[in-house]
Amino acid sequence: MRGVDVMLLEKGDFCSGSSGGNHGLLHSGARYAVKDPESAKECVSESRILKGIAWNCIEDTGGMFVSVGKDDPGFADVFHDACKATGVRAARSTAKELHQVERNLSDDVADGFLVDDAVIDPFRLVLTNIEDARRHGATVRNHCEVVSFERSDGHIGEVKFKDQRNGSVGSVVPEVVVNAAGSSSGSIASMVGGNLAMTRDYGTLVVFSGKLVSGTVNRLRPPSDGDIIVPSHTSMIAGTTSRSISGPSDARPTIEDKELIIKEVSEMVPALRGARAIRAYGASRPLASGSSGRGASRTFKLIDHEEGGVDNLISIIGGKLTTYRMMAERTSDAVCAKLGVRANCTTGEEVMEASRLDEAVTLVSASQSESMRRRYGHVPSEMMNVVPVGSMGVQSCSCENVMRFELEHYASSEDVITIADLMRRTRAGMGYCQGTGCMWEMASALSDEGDIDLLIRDFVRERREGSSTVIEGDQLRQEMFRSHLLWPFQAARGGEER
Amino acid sequence: MSEEDRCIRCGSCMRACPVVSTFGESVFPGPRSLAVDAPRTGKPMSMDELLKCSICMMCRDACPSRIDLPRSILALRAANRRGTLRPGHKRLVENIDSYGYSVRPDEGVHGPYPCKGPTTCLFPGCISRWRRPEILDDAAYVLRSNGTEVACPEDLVCCGSPLEKIGEHERRERLVDRNFPILEKFERVVTTCPGCAGQIVGYGIDAMHIVEYLYEVVGVEHLVSGLDGKGLKIAVHMPCHLNRDVGPHTKEYVHSILGAIPGLKVVEYPEEDRCCGAGGSLLSGFPEMAAALAKGKASAADRAGADLIVTSCPFCVVNLTNAGTMRTLDIVSLLRTASNR
Amino acid sequence: MIDLPKKEVDVLVIGSGAAGAISAWDSAVKGLDVSMIGVGTPATEMSSGCIRFNDDRSVPEGLGLDRGDLEDAFSRAERFLIDEMKTSGLKMEGARRDQGRYYRCHGTIVPENIVQGPTSSGGLDRIEGERICVIGFEDRTEFDHRLFAKALAQRSDLRVEHIAVGTTNGVLRNSSVDDLLDMFVDAAGSASGEVVFVPPFISLKDIDRWEELEKRSGRKFAEPVMDLGMPGARLRDALISSASRAGVSITNGASIVGMSISKGSLNEVTVRSGHRLQHIECGAAVFCGGGLVGGGLGVSGKDVIDPLGLFDVRYLREGDGIDILARASSGGIRTGPGLEAIVDGEKVRNLFVAGASLPGMNIVEGNGIGDAMATALLASKAATEASR
Ligand SMILES: Cc1cc2nc3c(=O)[nH]c(=O)nc-3n(C[C@H](O)[C@H](O)[C@H](O)COP(=O)(O)OP(=O)(O)OC[C@H]3O[C@@H](n4cnc5c(N)ncnc54)[C@H](O)[C@@H]3O)c2cc1C
Ligand SMILES: Cc1cc2nc3c(=O)[nH]c(=O)nc-3n(C[C@H](O)[C@H](O)[C@H](O)COP(=O)(O)OP(=O)(O)OC[C@H]3O[C@@H](n4cnc5c(N)ncnc54)[C@H](O)[C@@H]3O)c2cc1C
């Protein structure tokens, strides 16, 4: 948007890092008001901006902070004052008022605040950004991992990347490199010989089927484990935990994490105890400061490695999804300064292209356009090209109400090579049956390019990883059912894997 | 955790649904989509879609997770009261408000014999009282000729089933309040309509469908003595609310009774338990759909080589007769015909 | 509500899947008065109708069953599948693969490894031809013909045409077989395939029309193996029809809700039928309620449970994460030695368990419908004796 020629490389799919592994809470700032006022202020301004420029990715649900029985009653005043000081809107409410908003709240809820939290769909947000960046001329490639940097005289020359589609190695010689590799930022920096002090802090989230809350529900206490419930599409996401990790091997949810989360969040919404957990996942918070865990500031840090001896590398770490735009603005300011570009950043004012699309809803039923609006924020007109003439098409995923033409539309994109890629774009397979029925439809939409065996196997493995810590009750029956359905497929394949 | 949360998406309910398999999911989304999926997405549901379920309960019986899908659909109808009703349903409500019956009383029909004395009440029900009065008459006849005198008090009104089906619970309560004091004085309440039987059981009164009464109290042997089936070949249509609400024991009863009538041949066909489309207020809301289902059912009976269809529900008689291809009799009418008198 | 009149039967079979049907059939052909009561869609009906007999007898032997008796039951079950099913209209054909024997309905093809070509081990059936035509319904999803066609097309030895035919709103033209036959014959005629794959569409009552299809078009027709649809329903209809012919009284839609057991003996079973309860006195009963999918077993937390709360249940307690699947597969109702149910730690002399309700019978790649049937024949034998 500032006239710079940009290339973005992503080793997995878009949003496969922390950005796809979070709550999706568009913070009003309240959570940070007490301990981290700087973050809180950032959230206030950024959440307002995002509701404008990326409205198609946001459900403006509102939210609340509630104190439960044994919580410190003094914290409410501290919280209220801090919100006032940071400009966070928080309306003090009685238990009765809160119950009117959320009828599944615990009877132990004493009082609390209504706040301007909202829910953001991170997949949609990232994809909308990518689409918009492309429209402005950026080259964006997923499934391309940066594997090496050529460095001489404190300057990065050629950058090599490996395309996972065919294993080929490509290269580019950039003037400036931005390292926004999230929790891998440290290793990217060290690949170049730079140094980046950061800690990785892992958080687990549990997905429940169905919605018991209509807005976000937060615990009115200093940030801690299991104190947030976020409604998201057809499910609820509860979390989180905080555990310092050293490498990718510990970066997975544990049963203890899951149990802790359920114990804590069910103090706010007791019905969650019996709700059907369908999945647990998580991500690492790349925290900028040396401290770790809850104490670490959630603001971001921009590092120019010039002092460290690399003159064209900038790293951006920490922060939050909510403040991603601000982080990007500061980063591109730094880039522009290096390149001598004068143009101003306009990301705060311009509504993103995909958010601007008008709906061309003539071919789908009312309930389908409703569903597409929920999942995409609008009804993407270009998708209509593949709707079979004279029919409303066939439903492929009934958990999430996804039609075959939606799958076909995304499957034809260069970006999409796995079933999970397709799932991230359409939500097919994200419901409680975890793709039991629609994975075949997704495989067949993709199978022109891909090996069917591999597609299915990868997807089943990916889904099982996510379900292994929560699988019990009817979700276990669900998984058993799916295993049975895989049988004819295995038989046809030779049956070497369960 | 709600019952619907137990779904494992095996699709058995969708495959069992007669409305889905006849019209397709684009016309009727089907039991799972309505009862399990829609509430999860929180999307506003169209009352029209909800009203296309015939509450045949095939899905409930098909569910390996034992989810009572029809009950959920009824609850959604009730929760969706703002949704507009079909013209037929509006008429039904008006009729109940004006006359206490879901259909408009016909001047020519005279209410049956309000007689004092008997301890058994034959509950008239809207259809057999006003649309098919001969069924009520035949029922009273069959009972009387088998030693049971019945009363049929004039003040009884609609049982409330049609209101339950469109989510009109308060109105239904008012009808219950009118019927209950009358019914509770009787030792036994018998109905010709399975829908009424189920409703009255819901009042807390042990109502019996007439098939149950004939089998359990009168006894098959007594009932069929002296009857002559006249060589008729009949196909049984098992009414959904008899088979799956009153209970599947009635299927055995119907077959025992019919099978014992000398000279009557019962033909077997796989569609015997399939819905005719009358129920769940489909007939009043979407008459074309009810008619298409009835046609399918009637032609199945026809293919099986039957001369006529015998069922045990006045509402099914109405709908199957509408199909126009097969003569359809209620079991009590058949019994009367077979008695040669 | 007043109870239904009491009933007496020699043998009561609970559950009407494969195990229930063959067990009821077996007792009835021996002249006993048998009732079978079931509700819900059995796993048997959800299956592909391709019946798997596991060569590995370790699961049933682990239940304390005698090897000789088992072999006898397995061969009786296989004979049943050929002789009885034929009388019910299903022509079953057997084949060997890996560690088992498989029976499927004539016309069903379990193709050899559809992707990697005919040399690798895999399915049961060689596709006899080089030119293949796959026909599917455009707007129905139960048979993914596009995926199937693409998979076949990835094989170098086959040339594949794919034809999608339309239905109206996804409805199989009101299920008229005549229309469907015409449609497939037409479609096949426009293609050059020697073997034509069509979605499984012929129900048991129309099964003899299959030949007509081949005769009219002069092609070989085949159905791919498929779960959750016609093949399983057809198998179940045939099983029910056999039981019914043998004189079993069958109730669909009622469920067993209780049992009265005293001094190691079952006296009475309580059944819910609609709004009412019925007490059935029986000489013996066989529980064939199925496994975790069919509904005979359930899961509470991580434990396999009996949803009726009647039986003692066996399962492993160790294991974590996804291992829990294997653990749950091994769960089931405790019996034995032999198939007598164990209730409150005590053997019940005239109550038997068969099929997927038994421990270890839920294993996905292992014991299928065939094993369920074999255990059911042993249970019916024992029940027949106990009821006298
Ligand atoms: C448990 C948890 C809950 C959270 N909840 C919220 C919340 O509710 N609201 C909120 O605002 N924030 C939340 N956050 C914070 C938020 O998720 C992160 O701050 C944000 O997503 C970070 O984005 P990022 O782009 O910096 O990193 P990432 O999203 O991790 O992106 C880095 C990307 O770089 C790629 N990459 C790495 N190495 C290479 C390479 N060699 N070549 C190419 N690509 C590479 C990765 O694949 C990855 O996709 C949460 C964080 C966690 C951990
Ligand atoms: C999706 C799927 C696909 C499969 N595919 C194959 C395959 O292709 N080949 C193969 O060989 N095997 C297959 N299997 C395994 C096989 O289906 C089962 O092992 C077998 O069918 C079990 O038979 P069963 O009679 O024991 O139980 P089921 O067939 O499940 O029957 C049990 C019946 O009892 C009823 N019941 C339970 N409790 C009660 C009660 N209290 N009162 C009344 N009724 C009750 C249940 O509702 C159910 O209808 C598959 C299984 C599944 C789930």
Image: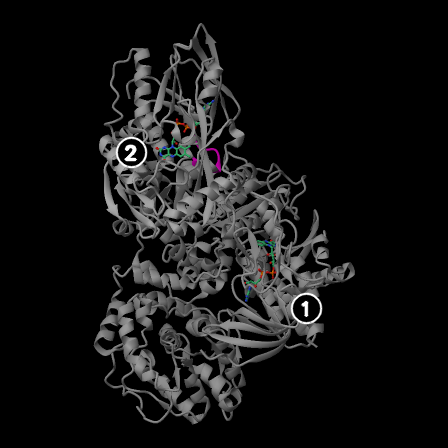
Q: Which is more toward the observer, A123 or B46?
A: A123
Residue at disc 2, secondary structure: loop
Specify few, some or many for label 2: CA neighbours under 10 Å numbering under 14, 14-19, or 20 or more: many
Chain for disc number 2: A
Q: Amino acid at mark 2?
A: Gly
In the rendered image, residue A325, in percent from the top left (x then y), is placed at 31, 27
Q: Which residues are magenta?
A: A411-419
Prevailing secondary structure of the magenta residues: loop
- State how far apart marks 1 and 2 are (Cα): 69 Å
Q: Quadrant of the N terminus of chain A?
A: top left
Q: Which is more toward the observer, B100 or B104?
A: B100
Determine the residue positioned at 56% across, 53% down: C303
In the rendered image, residue B32, in percent from the top left (x then y), is placed at 42, 56
Residue C380's disc number: 1
Front disc: 1 or 2: 2
Residue A29's disc number: 2
